[in-house]
């Protein structure tokens, strides 16, 4: 996995500014580390070898205090910068994602992306706050430290310069080995890890069959197995950190012993030796911390990866012609979904303006798919749909949908007021909304709600029954007052009494409009001027 | 039970491993500190040009520390994780033993899938608590104390400064961070919630929004929330920076204090000059070892609340108790009866009130009513997942509370709407119904559930995996498989909760007829909302809607109303 995905710079411009700030702060931090080491080395030498007192040391102490303040300021700025940029990047990605998903339209399995958009992107917080700054420091600090050490002591500089690159090399080698081993064991591990959740979630079922108590031993056995597999993975996974610690600490030890011996022989002065001793561990520290923050990076990048996969999905082409009027014709329309042997829909039919048509057939024969094709949610695999002779694929979908009112089988209600749920963003008067609700047979129960039209529905209309939701959706259709109405099993899941109310509303809605009803209940079919029976295709 | 006591109890079997991990950890961190202290002395001493032989001990020590830190750290991590995983196994076993008694009535979790998920994730928090909080803290406290003692012997002032610095980094900084996180969560949580709702509305409601040209309005609404969230996140960032600045300043100030205290001591002759570097430089290594504490401190609160939730679950009283002197129910045809039963899942809230219901042998009774009217509560009462708050449930005149719950569940089977399938094979799922069933018996049960042809057509037959929650097979197949499992167990009374979700109308109707047919001569309680199959039952019982402004058509003014009594036609 690449440590920094270049697409992050492309899709989230905030990243560029953040990287620039982080590099500047990294340089400042490295300079402060070097200055602090120099001051400490000189100060200790002055007191130890030259008998300096506090008075003589005052400038050194004053400068050290300044450096302490400086390092605190850098730490503060880094933390603030990473939090702000993470917020900015997440916001950019989130908006981009949602806009793109919306543009991709209902066919794109959008429901699966809810987690990514809400919690998934938060994984980028740790990536920006921990991993990215450490990565920058790992590149900057050793370079600046070595630059300071080079004129002071060549041997120590050479030792550090030679051992430093070994760390990433060995880590990559160990990492490649562990990754292969991890992949082998990951499936087994996730299955074992999942076992406990499975058993707890199914506990009521186990209890119903008197099987629950026997499970405790199984849980112990599976947990033991999980431990053994995990430890097998960890033994190699921790090797990379062993290599890292060993190389870093052993190098520091070798450098320390080396300068000690050269001090004895008089080839080196104390101040330089102390400088080397203080700076040597600093050169290795950022690399060690990058290793420790690897997981933060992996999770953050995985979330970003998922986001990019969506953003790089090409948008379907849109027609540009204005919406035509006239007969709707399905000419040998076939819809087939990849991975399914049978077609989801086969249809040839013409529906004249003002006709009320029922689409019938067993479930799975493509009634909803036919409505989806008309709405432009589904593109025919072959064949063509025309309206007034114009192929639908050439028509601007937004303008065309303005001609349509659609009542789906399971209408979505939004976390907003009843009014907003009926208007769906259209500007209109309360009187029109009330009339639409009355036409849809929803006036009574809406009036009975605690705050009438202003009642806030919670997520997905919880608190309303299926019939009430259906009638709110019908009110949308009444309010839209469109020439074409598409109804998808509007009375499914309703009991007889409610269904009769909804039927009456549909009869009112049909007046003067083209209406296509996906239906299988006889009373609903009876409402139509004409029945188009869809051949059973595929498996129901 | 407190979380700490819980942790102590479950940690006992792995105490040796945990101790070894602490020792290795102390060795590793100690080696890091020792390396810096010894090297500082070695270099200072070398500056006085002594014979090399006088330095040999220090040289050997520095090299040994250099190797020791890496190796001991590896041992610490391996041993620590092994011990923590043993503790995890113990905690799982204990929790499950407890849950087995509580489920499902004693725990709200069983009515919401995400809560079950959280419960299981909470168990994993014990790993975090041990390996990433307690182990690093214990090690740092021990090594920190040792370092403070070492520096303090040389210069009490410097030792005091180091001790104060460690308290700031290990205690004050995590507390600061926690306070900042609480404040920002308070600001951010409602905005995050708004954003999630708006995003769910957009993504789940996309067809409706596209059809009505309302996508842009919804995107604008999300944009507004997003902007407010981003501004709030930016405002919170300053607080996060403060604790980082405090941690950075503390290290520097300790070194500075060491230099001042050391200089004074050297001048006054209480400290040998060659030890000055030890006092000044040792804190650098100590703070490097303590650098992980703020992160560990941040994890502490989360892991602690997870363990607290578990401790609460382990202390929760079971709602259904085993009778001290159980009465056996003799074999033969059984009559179950609800006598003016009032019951609820949470104290003070009734789900059903004053219910009377008789289930005579071989009768088929349909229970209808809108959602929330307590249909599933009645099912739970009959399998003794729940005991009535008032009134009683009897089998052949014996109060169910006097019968062993396991015995009740041998007589009464319940096929809930969302019957659970385990992530294993079809065969294993069926054998939960009867453990010693032969393949032929499994096939017979599958045939009754009209699933035999489908299973025979699968390449791996009974060994086919059904996937997590049975998601690899269709909703109808899941239900039929669960039915076959219930048939294998051969209950005298079968409660069938009709599927409504994820199945279209016709499939659901066909399935319900099959369920009834497969039940054969058993007593059946069919929970349903459909009117088109009521000709297949002997009796229909309607429950009133107890929730206001939710009622549809089946509202009756009080209690249970019998409104049809038809004789079975077929």
Image (tube, grey):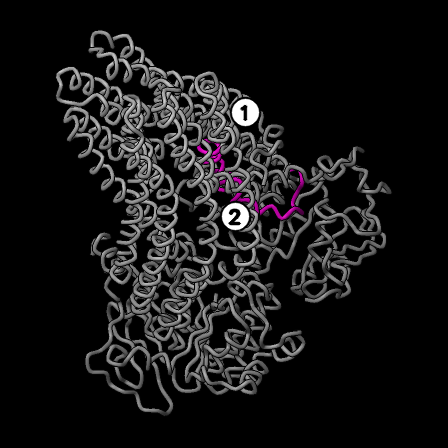
Percent x, y of residue B460: 63, 74
Q: What residue is drawn where x is 83% and y is 49%?
A: A329
**Residue A331 versus residue A96 in the image, above or below:** below
Mark 1 is surrounded, within 10 Å at the Cα level, by few (under 14), some (14 to 19) or many (20 or more) other residues, namely many
Percent x, y of residue A522: 67, 65
Write the start and end of the magenta stretch as one range: A103-131
Q: Secondary structure at mark 1?
A: helix
Tell me which chain the residue with mark 1 is part of.
A
Tell me which chain the residue with mark 2 is part of.
A
Residue B538 visible in this rendered orientation of the protein: yes
Residue under numbered circle 1: A14
Q: Which mark is residue A442?
A: 2
Percent x, y of residue A434: 53, 39
In reply to whether residue A112 is colored magenta, the answer given is: yes
- Mark 1 → mark 2, Cα distance in angstroms: 49 Å
In reply to whether residue B473 is colored magenta, the answer given is: no
Badge nearest the viewer, 1 or 2: 1
* Relative horizontal placement of residue B445, taking residue B80 as reference (left or right): right
Of callouts 1 and 2, the N-terminal one: 1
Residue B224 visible in this rendered orientation of the protein: no
């Amino acid at each position: 996995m690449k440590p920094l995905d270049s697409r992050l710079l492309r899709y989230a411009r905030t990243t560029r500014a953040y990287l620039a700030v982080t590099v500047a702060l990294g340089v400042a931090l490295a300079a402060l580390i070097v200055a602090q080491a120099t001051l400490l080395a000189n100060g200790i030498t002055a007191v130890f070898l030259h008998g300096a007192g506090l008075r003589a040391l005052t400038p050194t102490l004053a400068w050290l205090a300044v450096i302490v303040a400086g390092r605190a300021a850098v730490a503060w700025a880094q933390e603030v910068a990473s939090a702000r940029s993470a917020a900015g990047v997440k916001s950019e990605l989130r908006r981009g994602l949602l806009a793109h998903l919306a543009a991709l339209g209902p066919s794109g399995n959008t429901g699966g992306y809810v987690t990514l958009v809400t919690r998934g992107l938060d994984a980028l917080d740790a990536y920006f706050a921990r991993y990215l700054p450490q990565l920058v420091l790992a590149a900057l600090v050793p370079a600046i430290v070595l630059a300071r050490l080079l004129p002071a002591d060549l041997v120590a500089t050479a030792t550090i310069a030679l051992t430093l690159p070994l760390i990433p090399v060995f880590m990559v080698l160990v990492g490649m080995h562990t990754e292969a081993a991890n992949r082998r064991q990951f499936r087994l591990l996730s299955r074992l890890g999942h076992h406990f959740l499975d058993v707890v979630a199914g506990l009521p079922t186990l209890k119903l069959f008197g099987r629950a108590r026997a499970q405790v031993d199984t849980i112990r056995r599976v947990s033991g197995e999980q431990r053994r597999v995990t430890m097998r993975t960890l033994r190699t996974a921790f090797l990379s950190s062993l290599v890292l610690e060993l190389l870093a600490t052993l190098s520091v030890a070798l450098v320390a012993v080396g300068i000690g011996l050269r001090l004895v022989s008089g080839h080196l002065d104390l101040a330089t030796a102390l400088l080397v001793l203080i700076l040597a561990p600093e050169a290795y520290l950022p690399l060690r911390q990058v290793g420790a923050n690897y997981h933060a990076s992996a999770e953050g990048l995985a979330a970003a990866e998922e986001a990019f996969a969506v953003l790089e999905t090409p948008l379907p082409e849109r027609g540009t012609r204005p919406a035509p009027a006239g007969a709707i014709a399905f000419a040998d329309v076939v819809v087939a979904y990849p991975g399914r042997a049978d077609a989801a829909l086969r249809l040839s039919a013409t529906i004249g303006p003002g006709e009320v048509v029922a689409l019938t057939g067993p479930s799975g024969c493509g009634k909803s798919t036919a409505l989806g094709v008309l709405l432009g949610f589904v593109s025919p695999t072959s064949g063509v749909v025309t309206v007034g002779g114009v192929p639908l694929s050439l028509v601007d979908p937004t303008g065309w949908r303005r001609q349509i009112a659609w009542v789906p089988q399971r209408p979505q209600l939004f976390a907003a007021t009843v009014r907003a749920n009926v208007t769906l963003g259209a500007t209109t008067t309360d009187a029109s909304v009330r009339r639409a609700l009355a036409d849809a047979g929803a006036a009574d129960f809406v009036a009975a709600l605690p705050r009438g039209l202003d009642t806030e529905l919670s997520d997905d209309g919880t608190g309303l029954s299926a019939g009430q939701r259906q009638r709110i959706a019908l009110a949308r259709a009444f309010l839209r007052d469109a020439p074409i109405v598409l109804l998808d099993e509007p009375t499914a899941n309703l009991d007889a009494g409610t269904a009769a109310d909804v039927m009456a509303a549909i009869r009112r809605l049909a007046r003067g409009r083209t209406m296509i009803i996906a239906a299988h209940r006889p009373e609903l079919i009876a409402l139509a001027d004409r029945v188009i029976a869809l051949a059973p295709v595929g498996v129901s | 039970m407190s979380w700490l006591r819980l942790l102590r109890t479950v940690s006992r079997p792995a105490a040796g491993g945990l101790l070894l991990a602490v020792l290795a950890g102390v060795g590793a961190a100690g080696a890091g500190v020792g390396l810096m202290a010894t090297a500082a002395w070695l270099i200072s001493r070398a500056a006085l040009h002594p014979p090399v032989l006088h330095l040999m001990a220090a040289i050997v020590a520095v090299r040994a520390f250099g190797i020791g830190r890496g190796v001991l750290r590896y041992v610490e991590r391996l041993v620590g994780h092994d011990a923590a995983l043993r503790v995890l196994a113990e905690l799982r076993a204990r929790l499950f033993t407890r849950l087995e008694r509580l489920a499902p009535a004693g725990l709200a979790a069983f009515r919401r899938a995400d809560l079950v998920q959280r419960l299981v994730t909470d168990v994993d928090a014990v790993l975090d608590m041990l390996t990433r909080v307690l182990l690093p803290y214990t090690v740092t406290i021990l090594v920190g104390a040792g370092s403070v003692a070492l520096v303090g012997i040389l210069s009490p002032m410097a030792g005091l400064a180091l001790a104060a610095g460690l308290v700031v980094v290990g205690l004050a900084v995590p507390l600061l961070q926690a306070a900042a996180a609480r404040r920002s969560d308070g600001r951010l949580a409602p905005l995050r919630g708004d954003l999630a709702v708006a995003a769910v509305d957009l993504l789940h409601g996309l067809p409706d929004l596209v059809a009505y040209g309302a996508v842009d309005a919804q995107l604008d609404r999300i944009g507004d929330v997003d902007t407010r969230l981003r501004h709030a996140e930016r405002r919170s960032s300053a607080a996060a920076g403060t604790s980082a600045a405090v941690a950075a300043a503390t290290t520097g100030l300790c070194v500075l204090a060491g230099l001042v205290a050391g200089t004074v001591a050297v001048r006054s002759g209480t400290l040998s000059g060659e030890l000055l570097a030890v006092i000044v430089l040792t804190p650098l290594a100590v703070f490097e070892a303590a650098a992980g504490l703020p992160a560990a401190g941040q994890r502490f609160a989360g892991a602690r609340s997870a363990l607290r939730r578990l401790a609460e679950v382990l202390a929760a009283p079971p709602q259904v108790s085993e009778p001290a002197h159980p009465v056996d129910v003799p074999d033969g045809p059984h009559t179950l009866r609800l006598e003016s039963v009032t019951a609820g899942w949470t104290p003070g809230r009734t789900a059903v009130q004053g219910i009377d219901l008789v289930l005579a042998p071989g009768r088929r009774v349909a229970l209808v009513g809108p959602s929330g009217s307590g249909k599933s509560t009645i099912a739970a009462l009959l399998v003794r997942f729940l005991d009535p708050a008032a009134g009683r449930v009897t089998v052949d005149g014996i109060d169910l509370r006097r019968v062993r719950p396991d015995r009740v569940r041998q007589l009464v089977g319940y096929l809930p709407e969302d019957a659970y399938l385990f992530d294993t094979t079809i065969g294993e799922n069926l054998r939960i119904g009867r453990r010693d069933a032969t393949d032929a018996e499994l096939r017979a049960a599958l045939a009754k559930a009209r699933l035999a042809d489908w299973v025979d057509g699968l390449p791996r037959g009974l060994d086919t995996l059904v996937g997590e929650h049975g998601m690899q097979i269709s909703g109808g197949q899941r239900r039929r498989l669960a039915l076959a499992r219930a048939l294998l167990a051969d209950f005298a009374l079968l409660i069938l909760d009709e599927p409504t979700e994820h199945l279209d109308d016709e499939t659901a109707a066909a399935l319900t007829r099959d369920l009834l047919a497969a039940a054969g001569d058993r007593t059946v309680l069919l929970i349903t909302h459909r009117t088109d199959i009521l000709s297949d039952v002997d009796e229909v019982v309607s429950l009133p809607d107890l929730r206001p402004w939710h009622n549809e058509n089946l509202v009756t003014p009080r209690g249970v109303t019998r409104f049809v009594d038809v004789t079975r036609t077929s």
